[in-house]
Image (cartoon, rainbow, N blue to C red):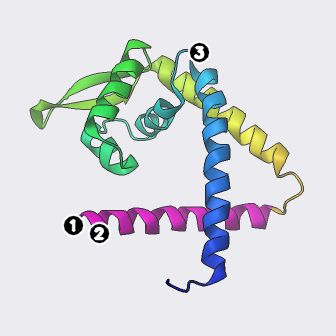
């Protein structure tokens, strides 16, 4: 059995807890965006809103989920009027995803609600600690993504 530093065991426990809470919170956020929106589709919508013109294949790679799952969720987002597909001007076979005005509005409202909730929950934190946590989580995400992508190569 490999001996690992206990800080990695502690980290694994905290990430597991964080993910469980994020899934629960994601369900509430998705319902705020649209009552018929599946929680797993909200991150896709949010990413399309932040990156208009993204392709479905890029979403699949970014989130590490299969093309069929992404396609199904994008179809639902389109049915709900939250995204639209446009033809890629550089490749007429490709489609680019853009948020609709309604999709932008709903994501902005949901994001604002999440930011307000975080501000309330972490009201006792120093702003520098909040910034440090955000920076460390961003670094973690980048390193994990890089590691996962190198594992596929």
- Quarter assignment of residue 89: top left
User: What residue is at 33 percent from the left and 21 percent from the top?
Assistant: 75
Determine which of the numbered discs, if any, sits on residue 35 in the image. 3
Percent x, y of residue 152: 25, 63
The part of the chain drawn in magenta is: 127-153
Q: Secondary structure at mark 1?
A: loop
**Vertical order, 153 against 117 (above or below):** below
Q: Residues within 10 Å of mark 3 (few under 14, many from 20)?
A: few
Q: Earlier in the sequence, mark 2 or mark 3?
A: 3
User: What residue is at 66 percent from the left and 37 percent from the top?
Assistant: 24
Residue highlighted by disc 1: 153
Q: Secondary structure at mark 3?
A: loop
Percent x, y of residue 83: 39, 23
Mark 1 and mark 2 in contact? Answer it, CB < 8 Å: yes
Q: Is residue 61 left or right of residue 89?
A: right
Residue highlighted by disc 2: 150
The question of residue 101 being in magenta is answered with no
**Vertical order, 47 against 109 (above or below):** below
Q: Is residue 95 visible?
A: yes
User: What residue is at 63 percent from the left and 73 percent from the top?
Assistant: 9
Q: Is residue 57 left or right of residue 5?
A: left
Q: Is residue 55 visible?
A: no
Q: Earlier in the sequence, mark 1 or mark 3?
A: 3
Q: Quadrant of the C terminus?
A: bottom left
- Label 1 and label 3: CA atoms lie apart by 39 Å
Q: Work out whether residue 67 or residue 44 is closer to the camera in this orientation and state it.
A: 67
**Vertical order, 26 against 106 (above or below):** below
């Amino acid at each position: 059995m490999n001996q690992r530093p206990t800080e990695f065991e502690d980290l694994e426990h905290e990430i597991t807890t964080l993910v469980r809470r994020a899934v629960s919170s994601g369900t509430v956020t998705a319902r705020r965006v649209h009552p018929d929106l599946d929680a797993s589709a909200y991150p896709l919508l949010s990413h399309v809103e932040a990156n208009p013109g993204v392709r479905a294949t890029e979403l699949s790679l970014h989130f590490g989920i299969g093309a069929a799952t992404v396609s199904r969720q994008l179809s639902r987002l389109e049915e709900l009027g939250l995204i639209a597909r446009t033809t890629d001007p550089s490749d007429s076979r490709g489609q680019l995803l853009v948020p609709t005005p309604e999709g932008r509005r709903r994501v902005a409202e949901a994001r604002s609600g999440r930011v307000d909730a975080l501000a309330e929950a972490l009201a006792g934190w120093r702003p520098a600690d909040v910034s440090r946590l955000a920076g460390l989580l961003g670094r973690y995400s980048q390193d994990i993504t890089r590691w996962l992508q190198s594992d596929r190569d």
